[in-house]
Amino acid sequence: MFAIVRKTLFEKRFSLIAWALGALFMVWLTLIFYPSFSQGDQLDSLIKSLPPQLQGLVGNVNNFKSIGGYLDGVVFNLRVPLVTVTMAILFGISLTAADEEQGTLSTLLAQPVSRGRVLLEKFIALTASIIIVHIGVFFGLLLALLNINYTYSISLLLAVTAGSLLLALVFGTFAFGLGIAFGKKGLISAIAAGVAFLAFLVESLAPSVKSLQGIQKISPFYYYTAPGTASNGLDWAYVALQALIIAALAIIGWAFFRHRDVEV
């Protein structure tokens, strides 16, 4: 049972360890600077000197003076997604389109195993991979808080980590769905990366650019940043919406994959 999951995770074990440790170090390095952000007004003066559009990218500096606001605005607004979303897209493509181009997928489908089982187990492996990297994120938070001698709600730390996990899974499933639907690694890499970048840009610039506010809610990043999860916890309506998006992307990919000829 779950032989494909086990084999996939075993083959990617070194890559997963590297991503998890990289995420841990990045979170730790970002969070240990919190005491400097929470004291003094030098950063506030610097941000106010920027054009309004760039101020929108940075956010409200006053929020950074609380640890929850710093986690939301500095640690999880850009830095964590930069690692986790990138990793999710790369893994989503590697488990589908890359495997097809290398001939691994056709070899697997030649075995006495259904396409449905292959797809399901590969998706489970993708989800497990994203969870492993977010375990690194969570322990990075704990180590940094220990280093700076601060305490924070474990439930809120788990919540903000889970919010990041959902966002990564949305984009990972998007890449995964494109991969199983079309099997073209280069094209899918460009589309997935481009969509992720545009989604982030829309959400970041919308507070300062009125023309973007009408489409802001199309971006998955809106449902990631709007709740202020590190301060307020998860918004379960947003969680449900993201879960529906993930399911829809996987189902659409599967609908294309069912009758498509896989390249040998």
Image (spheres, grey):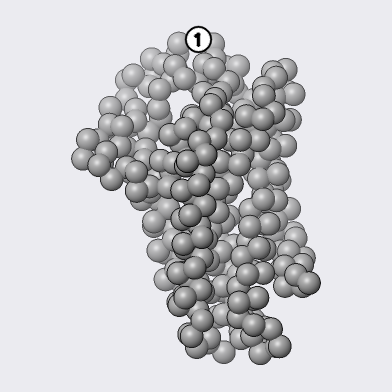
Say whether residue 29 is visible.
Answer: no
For label 1, the residue is 40
Q: Nearer the viewer, residue 94 or 51?
A: 94
Say whether residue 194 is visible.
Answer: yes
- Quadrant of the rendered structure where residue 80 is? top right
Classify residue 74 as left or right of residue 147: left
The residue furthest left is: 211
Badge 1 amino acid: Gly
Q: Nearer the viewer, residue 72 or 154?
A: 154
From the viewer's perspective, is residue 115 above or below residue 130? below
- x 52%, y 16%: residue: 65
Dot 1: element:
loop
Classify residue 244 as left or right of residue 154: left
Q: Position of residue 51 (x, y in %)?
A: 28, 27
Q: Nearer the viewer, residue 52 or 133?
A: 133
Q: Position of residue 253 (x, y in %)?
A: 48, 71
- x 60%, y 23%: residue: 33
Q: Quadrant of the N terminus?
A: bottom right
